[in-house]
Structures are given as C-alpha cells and as structure tokens.
Image (cartoon, rainbow, N blue to C red):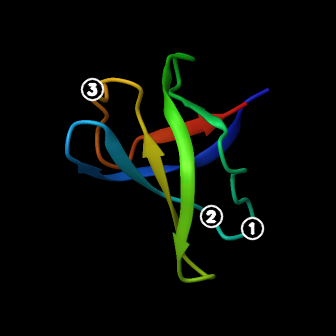
Amino acid sequence: MLKLAGNFTERIGDRRIILRCEAGQLPKLYSDVKDRRFKKIGKIVEIFGNVESPYALVVCPERCPSVKIGEKLYIK
C-alpha cells in the first residue's frame, strides 16, 4: 500500500527534488519515493522547514525523471 509522501514543488540540479509534505503525515527518512506508476524516483534524505508546512529533500540515484509541479509522489 502506498502512502502520500508529498507534492513535487521544485527541482534542484539534476539529482535533487523538493516535496511539500502534510504536517500530519510526515514520511520516514530514507524511504523510497515512487510515482503513481510505482517507478522509483529516489530516497528521502532530509525533512526541513516549518512544523506546519514541512518539506522533504529527495535524492535521485541518477538524473531525476520528469515530474510535473504539483504531482503527488508516494512512499511504500
């Protein structure tokens, strides 16, 4: 079963992306992040920001696949 990790907000370089998470459902560190087609995007390596509107940093193993702003990404 997949759980929502957050919504894609920004790309940083070729291998890092930022997700906006929900405060009540923070993803665990080092969880694998997948898209809606179950394709692995990367791993969550950091949670940061305000307690009410946290963000997660995802590092991709290679160049990050194309993800649209606002697209929902998931963890297992």
Which residue matches tag 1?
24
Q: Is residue 54 visible?
A: no
Q: Quadrant of residue 22?
A: bottom right
Q: Evaluate if marks 1 and 2 touch, with contact meaning CB atoms under 8 Å apart.
A: yes
Instruction: Say whether residue 41 is left or right of residue 21.
Output: left
Residue at 40 percent across and 32 percent down: it is 60
In the displayed structure, would residue 51 be above or below residue 11?
Answer: below
Q: Can the viewer see residue 19?
A: yes
The part of the image, by quadrant, that contains residue 63 is top left
Where residue 31 appears, as percent x and y from the top left, is 67, 38
Q: Which residue is mark 2?
A: 22
For residue 75, side relative to residue 37 (left or right): right
- Residue lying at 53% horizontally and 71% vertically, measured from the top left: 48
SS type, badge 3 = loop
Q: Residue at x 55, y 50 (%)?
A: 45
Cα–Cα gap, marks 3 and 1: 30 Å
Per the image, the residue denoted by label 3 is 63
